[in-house]
Image (cartoon, rainbow, N blue to C red):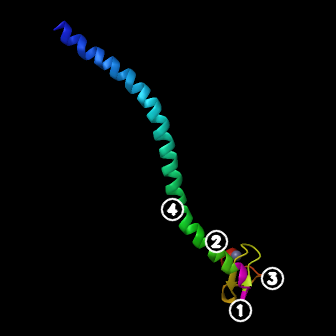
Amino acid sequence: MATDYDAPRKSEEDLSEDSIEELKSRRADIGSNDVDEDENEAAESFELPGADLSKEELTVLVVPPQEDEFTCTSCFLVQHTSQMSENSDPSAPICIDCAG
Ligand SMILES: [Zn+2]
């Protein structure tokens, strides 16, 4: 009984010591892996819309406002003149959304 009782305790202690050291090394590995995976996932999920957004932003920057468009002086979005607030100052047009 005593031998049986000691045996698992020793192995448990050994296991715990081993597991602690393993955990330390694994924690570093897992931690770095998690960070890498998170960064990869974040980069992947962020890259796709980010690339699309940058392309769209480039398109918006390259294409000047058309004659039937104006740049809202409040939100600086290029809006169709139909979205211009009727009460806005022609020299400082604002969109209906910003006019409230
Ligand atoms: Zn606006």
- Identify residue type, mark 1: Asp
Judge depth for marks 1 and 2 and give the one in front. 2
**Percent x, y for residue 8?**
24, 17
Q: Is residue 63 above or below residue 12?
A: below
> Please, what secondary structure does the residue beneath circle 3 have?
loop
Residue labelled with disc 1: 68
Q: Is residue 24 magenta?
A: no
- Residue 89 occupies quadrant: bottom right
User: Badge 2 is on which residue?
Assistant: 54
Query: Mark 1 to mark 3: distance in Å?
Result: 16 Å
Which callout, 2 or 3, points to the residue nearer the camera?
Answer: 2
Give how far apart the Cα atoms at labels 3 and 4 are: 42 Å
Disc 4 element: helix
Q: Is residue 37 above or below residue 53?
A: above
Q: CA distance from mark 1 to mark 4?
A: 36 Å
Determine the residue positioned at 21% across, 12% down: 5
Q: Which mark is residue 89?
A: 3
Q: CA distance from mark 2 to mark 3?
A: 32 Å
Residue 99 visible in the shown view = no
